Each structure stands twice: as C-alpha cells, then as structure tokens.
Image: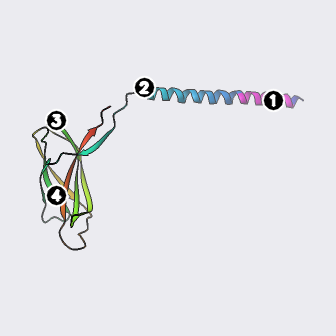
Amino acid sequence: MKQLIVNAFVSLVSGIFLVVGVAGTAWVVEKAFREESKRPHRPMSFSKPLPDGAVVETSVVPNVPNFAVRGSVRNTDTKDWDVTEIRVDLLSKGVVVNKCSDVVDYRTVKPGQTVNFLVVCRDIASPASGEPFEHRVIALQFHRDPE
C-alpha cells in the first residue's frame, strides 16, 4: 500500500511538471510570435528589366578565351536606377541556347548617367552548327513592391 501511495505521488508530481512545461513552452512561443508580428515588415522586392533602350551599346570582346560582352547602360528616366544584374542571352538562329549573367554590387545609375559593364560567359559551348552566337543583353534593376 505504501508503494502504491508513493507511485501515485510520483505520477502526480510528474504530471504537474509536464503541464507546467507544456504551458511554459506555449507561453514562450506565443510571446515570440507576438513580438515578431510587431516588427515592421520589409516590402517584397525583386528585380525587373530596365526599359527598352537602357542598354545603349554592346559588343563582343574579340580574342578572349571565353565569350564576353561589354556595353553601356544609360538612365533615360527621371529617377535613380539600382542596377543589380546584367544578363546575356546567347542565341543561335534566334533561339536562346544559353544564358549568363554578372551580378552587380548594387550600382546606382543617376538620371542621364551612363555606366559600362563587362559580362564574361564561362563554360559556354559553341553552337552545334558552328555559326557564331548572336546575343541579347538585358539589364535588371532592383524593384520594391509598394506596401
């Protein structure tokens, strides 16, 4: 009988600790969630192509081991552009066969300003037909959704 009372007491104490532990954990999680929801949220951001005509000049760099394109981007807008990436699409007979890009360290281009770029495409195989690549350059800018 004595052992039965001791076992009941141990079970009771264990149950109390379990309930206190679960309730305490739930309280901490709820408190953390509430604090997180009070923080201001950063608006969603992404990259979008610059307007047509922003890339004003491109040329293939001759006599280099990798396919390389240099060119210029000119801001024709009244606002600053935050250029984040220059992408080169390589085309064969008008079809995109490969892509490469250079991620820029967040370059701000003021209205009327022109900046130069160089994109080196590594590990690019020549078109199977042996004809030279055509290329298309797309400049991307940082864009933030309005809240």
Residue 8: image quadrant is top right
Q: Are marks 1 and 3 in contact (CB under 8 Å)?
A: no
Residue 70: image quadrant is bottom left
Tag 1, which secondary structure?
helix
Which disc, if any, is residue 38?
2
Amino acid under disc 3:
Lys
Q: Identify the mark nearer the N-term, 2 or 4.
A: 2
Q: Which residue is mark 3?
A: 79
Q: Nearer the viewer, residue 55 or 27?
A: 55
Tag 4, which secondary structure?
strand
Which disc, if any, is residue 69?
4
Category of crowding for the residue at label 2, using alpha-carbon neighbours closer than 10 angstroms: few (below 14), some (14–19), many (at least 20) = few
Q: Tell me which residue sits at (18%, 45%) in the image.
A: 51
Q: Decide: is 138 above or below 1.
A: below
Q: CA distance from mark 4 to mark 3?
A: 27 Å
* Range covered by the magenta-colored residues: 3-15
Q: Which residue is mark 1?
A: 8
Q: Identify the mark nearer the N-term, 2 or 1.
A: 1
